Image (cartoon, rainbow, N blue to C red):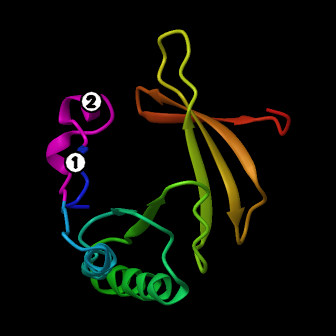
């Protein structure tokens, strides 16, 4: 959001994605974050739309995002996916899946522990995500980790 001073550094992203493929929008007001995300999903012109919200959205805005993504998939050139980033454990109502990601770097390797905490069609699970030649490799982790 526009009131945050921290920004992603393009050089830090270079190993993961070409920074020129990203469009950053910094709305000045919190309600504009969801509006911007809704319009981007409705356009169906981007495969992934990410919004970092100060708190989990309510059910009505989440439903509007679902409808916008459906419109984008029907009328746009591709099927868009919306990703909402929230501090803490999230907790938005009406979402398809809830995930948690945390760094798990070791031995000079970039890795992340990614957990599927809630999904309508899949059980909870944990994975180790690591960069690979073709993108990322996800390795399932046992339940005790």
Q: Look at the numbered disc 2 and give the secondary structure of its residue.
A: helix
**Badge 1 local density, few (<14 within 10 Å), some, or many (20+)?**
few
| Quarter the N terminus occupies | bottom left
Left or right of 72 on screen, residue 144: right
Rendered position, 104 above or below 71: above
Q: Disc 1 designates what residue?
A: 5
Magenta run includes residue 40: no
Please tell me which residue lies in front, 128 or 33.
33
**Magenta range:** 8-24
Residue 126 x %, y %: 71, 43
Could you tell me which residue is drawn at 45 percent across and 64 percent down?
Answer: 84
Q: Which mark is residue 88?
A: none
Tell me if residue 9 is in the magenta stretch: yes
In percent of width and height, residue 132 lies at 45, 27
Q: Is residue 64 left or right of residue 75?
A: right
**Picture quadrant of residue 31:** bottom left
Report the quarter where the C terminus lies.
top right
Q: Is residue 37 above or below residue 126?
A: below
Residue 12 shows which numbered tag? 2
């Amino acid at each position: 959001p526009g009131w945050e001073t921290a920004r992603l550094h393009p050089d830090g992203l270079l190993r993961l994605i070409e920074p020129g493929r990203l469009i950053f929008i910094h709305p000045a007001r919190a309600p504009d974050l969801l509006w911007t995300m809704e319009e981007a999903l409705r356009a169906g012109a981007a495969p992934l739309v990410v919004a970092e919200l100060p708190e989990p959205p309510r059910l009505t805005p989440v439903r509007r995002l679902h409808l916008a993504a459906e419109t984008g998939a029907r009328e746009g050139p591709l099927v868009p996916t919306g990703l909402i980033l929230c501090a803490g454990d999230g907790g938005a109502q009406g979402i398809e899946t809830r995930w948690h990601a945390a760094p798990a770097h070791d031995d000079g390797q970039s890795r992340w522990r990614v957990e599927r905490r809630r999904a309508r069609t899949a059980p909870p699970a944990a994975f180790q995500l690591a960069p690979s030649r073709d993108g990322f490799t996800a390795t399932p982790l046992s339940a005790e980790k």
